[in-house]
Image: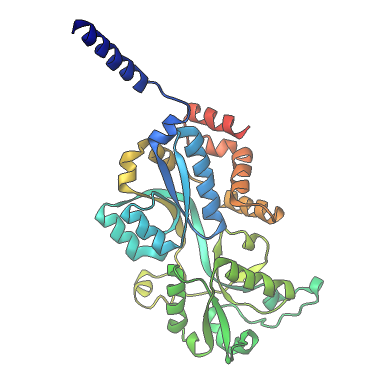
Amino acid sequence: MKGKSRYLIRIVMLLVCMSLIVLPGAASAAKGTVRFADLSWDSAQVHNRIAGFIIKNGYGYDVEYLPGETIPMVSGLIRGDVDVDMESWTENIQEIYDKGIKSGKMLDLGSNFPDSWQGWLVPTYMIKGDPKRGIKPITPDLKSVSDLPKYWKVFQDPEVPTKGRFYNSIPGWKCTEINSIKLKAYGLDKTFTDFITGSDAALSGSMMGAYKKGQPWVGYYWTPTRILTQLDMTPLEEPPFDKKIWDTTKACAYQSVQVNILINADFAKQAPDVVSFLKQYETTNNENLEIGDFLKENKDSKPQDAAMWFMKEKEASWTKWVSADVAKKVKAAMK
């Protein structure tokens, strides 16, 4: 029996020792997967892949990009189906944002990039013309949303010839609902249709298509974005942002917003090292416009390509977000 006991003890000790051995790749599997809300516009997808590359190679987690639109993704964040939203336009989702923060199920880590703009705009050639393209100004007095009714025929909707067409954003975006409310608040629903596009590609495509042909276009868009680094567009004036007006009719300009990083609260407990990194993550409007320029100049590029361009060209920026040890691992993975 003594011999068997010694044998069993050796087996147990061997198993214990084996359990302490960390095989290559095991750390990543043990740490699990960080799930990003992969929203449908360029900047959000690029930020996801910048953060994802650093998290995977610097901290040893796997990463996953879950495609979806704003409201479903933030709802998923609150439920715990999504871990990170790198680009939350908070004022556009104020109600669900407040609900998530108040419940304690969602945390706001602060700004990704500051002072973003969103609003209504038209091609500048409509107001000033473009002599190089042989375009004369057809709406020279168009300066504000209040000027739109007298120009509705210029923007005539081919499907509803008695009204102009306003290009709204897409289903699932809170700003789409806000734009619809604004149209009614300004009385523009009497002279313009509320044309809701099916995707960001359709919205930006309608703008680009009109611009290339020198045709009229009026609608909603935002910065920093790829397309607005390519086109000369003029924002239409609105009454200055006023919280009382915004909370009732929304008949005023969008507020200048900071685009923040949101995370699931349980995820914060599971991956405190990642959360510490995301708290430091912050870019500038100029950096985002440069990302847009890269995508413009490299038309076949994907978000991952732009992310790697940023990692290589903006090393001085992203290395401030992480420790020297993490930066070393990430740099090694870039080679």
The quadrant the C terminus occupies is top right
Please say whether residue 302 is visible from this viewpoint: yes
Q: Residue at x 65, y 59 (%)?
A: 229
Residue 147 appears in which quarter of the rendering?
bottom right
Provide residue 142's location: percent of width, then percent of height. 61, 80
**Of residues 216 and 129, the one drawn nearer to the viewer in this rendering:** 216
Q: Is residue 240 visible?
A: no
Q: Is residue 121 above or below residue 94?
A: below
On-image quarter of the N terminus: top left
- In the displayed structure image, the side of residue 23 where residue 127 appears, left or right: right
User: What colour scheme was applied to this rendering of the protein?
Assistant: rainbow
From the viewer's perspective, tell me whether residue 272 is left or right of residue 194: left
List the single residue furthest toward the front: 1
Q: Kindly identify the residue that appears in the image at 57 percent across and 83 percent down.
A: 165
**Residue 246 image point, x, y percent:** 38, 72
Instruction: From this view, report whether residue 105 is shown above or below residue 232.
Output: above
Where residue 140 appears, as percent x and y from the top left, is: 67, 81
Q: In x, y percent, where is residue 27?
A: 42, 30
Quick one: which residue is furthest to the left in this view? 1
Question: In the figure, is residue 260 to the left or right of 335?
Answer: left
Front in this rendered view, residue 70 or 256: 70
Residue 200, relative to residue 47: is it above or below?
Answer: below
Residue at point 53% right, 46% down? 49
Residue reaching furthest bottom?
162
The furthest residue to the top: 2
